[in-house]
Image (spheres, rainbow, N blue to C red):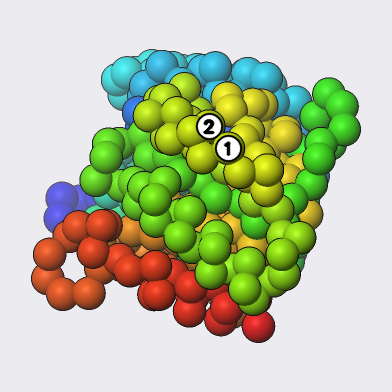
Amino acid sequence: MPRWYYRVRHSFQAGITPVYNNMPGIVVFIRSMAFFGDQLVTYPLLHQLNKLYPHSPITVVAHDPVEQHYTHLPWVHRFVQANNWREKYRAIPADTDIVIALHHSSEQYALLAAAKRIRSRLGFKNKRAFDFVWNHAHKKDINDYIGLANLQLLNTLHAFDLMEAARGCIQWLAGQKPGRTEHTDVMFMVGGGAGAFKRWGVPNYTALADRLIQHMGSQTTFTFVLGPAEEEELSQLKALNRPEFKLLVSRPLSEIADLALHAKLIVANDCGPSHIAQNACVPYVGLFNEANPEWFWQRSNTRAVIPDGPVSDIQRITVEQVEQACLAVMA
């Protein structure tokens, strides 16, 4: 390493910090991706940040144009789309006290925190040269659910109950619903914005419902959550004309959150709304075309179901497999 690297490392290990005013700010560099689920996994972190530091303005910085997912949140005071190092540097106000980098594969966020001399620097350690910059760090593990890892990172700065924080975020979302929501016993999230390879299919969910009725009773109600991309699934469900099947189509997150909090069981494809379900901390079964631990929160009342064998085909998951997983999480 060059000499300047060791000078910078010694400075930060010595704890040299600047003076801050009484209203410090917080900057969060998010992993902004194209899919909705990538945004939802940051919500519990931002909600908990606002709870811990209610008087500190929070700035979210992203590389991609995902502003619409954040500006409606009262926990986020400013959104900045920054496409290069200079724009990201300028996105950190002079009075910033805390920088949180949710990226784990880039050195530039550690360099930004170092250049700005931020007092509390939170980032993932991932065997990178500038890991030493983070004075509050969590070791990156690709087997950790991303939303949980974000909360674990914040927990290094201020201890709190992780599951309570996640559920608290969903409770806040549910509290924003405009009116009353008819609750349900079982939620099925049948979408998958990335494509058909993530969708288990209405016939399988219908067969699963028939089996669950045998265990949960003839009065069991089911709500299917669908978005604008699930037109085919919507047509199939309408054609069934089953009174115990309720359809929640293109509804606000607040309604989905409220239903999730009160459900006895949620079964979901790997889709955006599944992260509302997982953070509600209710019994949950996730269906994946292949193992994907970064998008599944492993808990005692959750199960991930993947196809048997080497072929990644979600249609190879049997109804019996999912039925057994449902019974296990409800137990």
Residue 241 numbered tag = 1
- With 317 as the anchor, is 67 left or right in this view? right
In contact (CB < 8 Å): disc 1 and disc 2: yes
> Hey, which residue is sitting farthest right in the picture?
180
**Residue name at image x 48 percent, y 73 percent:** 323
Disc 2: CA contacts within 10 A as few (<14), some (14-19) or many (>=20)? few
Disc 1: CA contacts within 10 A as few (<14), some (14-19) or many (>=20)? few
Question: Where the N terminus falls, by quadrant?
Answer: bottom left
Q: Nearer the viewer, residue 126 or 98?
A: 126
Question: Where the C terminus falls, by quadrant?
Answer: bottom right
The local secondary structure at tag 2 comes to: helix
Point out residue 171 in the picture as x, y percentages from the top left corner: 79, 46
Point out residue 206 in the picture as x, y percentages from the top left corner: 48, 54
**Residue name at image x 72 percent, y 34 percent:** 255
Q: Nearer the viewer, residue 299 or 154?
A: 299
- Image height of 85 relative to 325, above or below: above
> Hey, which residue is sitting farthest left in the picture?
310
Residue 216 numbered tag = none
The local secondary structure at tag 1 comes to: loop
- With 284 as the anchor, is 257 left or right in this view? right
Residue type indicated by callout 1: Asn
Q: Is residue 59 visible?
A: no
The Cα atoms of the two marked residues, 1 and 2, are separated by 5 Å
**Residue name at image x 12 percent, y 71 percent:** 310
Residue 238 numbered tag = 2
- With 212 as the anchor, is 219 left or right in this view? right
Q: Nearer the viewer, residue 10 or 228?
A: 228
